[in-house]
Image (cartoon, helix red, strand yellow):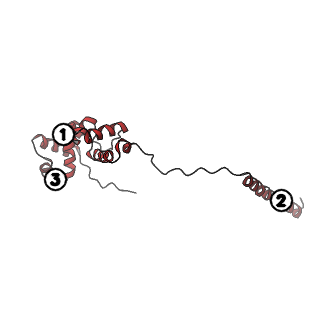
């Protein structure tokens, strides 16, 4: 079992950070003023710049699901189109910089094909090969031998008990 050790901050902390952002504070000074981790406040500032305060206040900690087309469009806009990652986040509705960075790296290495979804989970094993006629006959022979042995024991029990 895995325990989630990430710190979750309440809405009041995010409201206070938004207030400081609106006053012109950067993420470092806001983090120090609020006694919060700098990286968390830096991510909040990215989201605040890209989407505004409403989205930052509605964050629920769930991961976003993005289609193949969204991934390719965002990655190509950053890599080929010269768009900044923050602009791409706003334009394509991406809530975090992390997946966008990963998509850009994959896009640079393998193009759009590298972003295609891959099957998840354990690969299926090879299908059982069809049994040969000889194997079928051997199986039938084993079943018939077991049946004969069963009937012999039954006959012996009947004779012993005199039924």
User: Residue 102's x, y, as percent?
Assistant: 31, 48
Examine the rendered structure and indicate whether residue 162 appears above or below residue 59.
below
The span from disc 2 to disc 3 (Cα, nearest Å) is 84 Å
Residue 120 seen by the camera = yes
> At x 88% / y 64%, what residue is drawn?
160
- Disc on res. 35: 3
Does the CB distance between marks 1 and 3 fall below 8 Å?
Answer: no
- Which residue is disc 2 drawn over? 154
From the top left corner, tell me how far across and down residue 29 is, in percent.
Answer: 11, 50
Camera-near label (1 vs 3) is: 1
Q: Read off the residue under disc 1.
A: 49
Query: Residue 67, can we see it?
Result: no
Cα separation between marks 1 and 3: 21 Å
Q: Earlier in the sequence, mark 1 or mark 3?
A: 3
Q: Position of residue 85 (x, y in %)?
A: 23, 42
User: Observer-nearest residue: 105 or 64?
Assistant: 105
As helix, strand or loop, the secondary structure at mark 1 comes to: helix
Which label lies toward us, 2 or 1?
1
Q: Would you place residue 123 above or below residue 80 in this image?
A: below
Could you tell me which quadrant the N terminus lies in? Answer: bottom left
Q: Nearer the viewer, residue 23 or 70?
A: 70
């Amino acid at each position: 079992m895995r325990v989630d050790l990430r710190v979750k901050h309440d809405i009041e902390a995010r409201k206070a950070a938004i207030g400081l952002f609106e006053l012109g504070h950067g993420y470092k000074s806001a983090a120090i003023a609020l006694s919060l981790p700098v990286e968390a406040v830096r991510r909040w500032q990215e989201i605040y710049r890209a989407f505004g305060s409403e989205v930052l206040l509605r964050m629920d900690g769930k991961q976003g699901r993005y289609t193949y087309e969204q991934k390719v469009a965002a990655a190509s806009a950053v890599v080929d189109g010269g768009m900044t990652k923050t602009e791409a986040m706003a334009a394509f509705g991406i809530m975090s910089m992390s997946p966008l960075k990963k998509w850009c790296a994959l896009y640079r290495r393998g193009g759009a094909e590298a972003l295609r979804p891959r099957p998840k989970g354990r690969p299926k094993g090879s299908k059982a090969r069809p049994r040969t006629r000889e194997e079928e006959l051997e199986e039938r022979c084993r079943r018939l031998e077991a049946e004969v042995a069963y009937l012999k024991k039954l006959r012996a029990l009947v004779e012993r008990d005199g039924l």
